[in-house]
Image (tube, grey):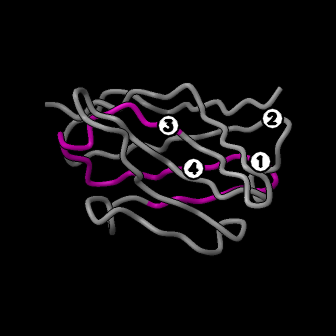
């Protein structure tokens, strides 16, 4: 059974940093289009960052560009989201997603809460 397990969320002060992890089992992350999404209370889920071509190509939402970095560690079959200069608007549940490139599948993690507050 495919599993994506996020970790690394928590409470951080404005201006702080966190690194989220998404560890995969069964599937090989580098064979998928990997993304981080987030959903704040009362808002729709939004795309934060995407990595394709085994992480060689990345794209970011304008709201996080220059502050967040998505990366893949093939040896650990794990995706990361390094988040710097966090602000309260970044507060949300963050989800990792694996989108099939050759087959129509989407896998989701259970989410990890990130709260930015003083």
Residue placed under numbered mark 1 in the picture: 77
Q: Residue at x 64, y 67 (%)?
A: 52
Write down the region rendered in magenta. 69-95
- Mark drawn on residue 95: 3
In terms of sequence position, does the residue under pointer 3 or pointer 4 come before the other? 4
SS category of the residue bearing label 3 = strand
Residue 105 picture location, percent across and down: 72, 44
Q: Residue at x 61, y 35 (%)?
A: 108
Query: In this rendering, which labeled residue sits more in front, label 4 or label 2?
Result: 2
User: Are the residues flagged by discs 1 and 2 in contact, CB closer than 8 Å?
Assistant: yes
In terms of sequence position, does the residue under pointer 4 or pointer 2 come before the other? 2
Residue placed under numbered mark 2 in the picture: 25
In this view, 27 is above or below 72: above
User: Are the residues flagged by discs 3 and 1 in contact, CB closer than 8 Å?
Assistant: no
Which is nearer the eye, 107 or 94?
A: 107
Q: Quadrant of residue 90?
A: top left
Query: In this rendering, which labeled residue sits more in front, label 1 or label 2?
Result: 2
SS category of the residue bearing label 4 = strand
Is 80 one of the magenta-colored residues?
A: yes
């Amino acid at each position: 059974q495919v599993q994506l397990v996020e970790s690394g969320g928590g409470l951080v002060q404005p201006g702080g940093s966190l690194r989220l992890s998404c560890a995969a089992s069964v599937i090989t992350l580098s064979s998928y289009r990997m993304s981080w999404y987030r959903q704040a209370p009362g808002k729709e889920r939004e795309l934060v960052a995407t990595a394709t071509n085994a992480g060689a190509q990345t794209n970011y939402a304008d709201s996080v560009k220059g502050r967040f970095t998505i990366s893949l560690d093939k040896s650990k079959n794990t995706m990361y989201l390094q988040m710097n200069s966090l602000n309260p608007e970044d507060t949300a549940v963050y989800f990792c997603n694996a989108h099939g490139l050759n087959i129509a599948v989407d896998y989701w993690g259970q989410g990890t809460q990130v709260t930015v507050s003083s």
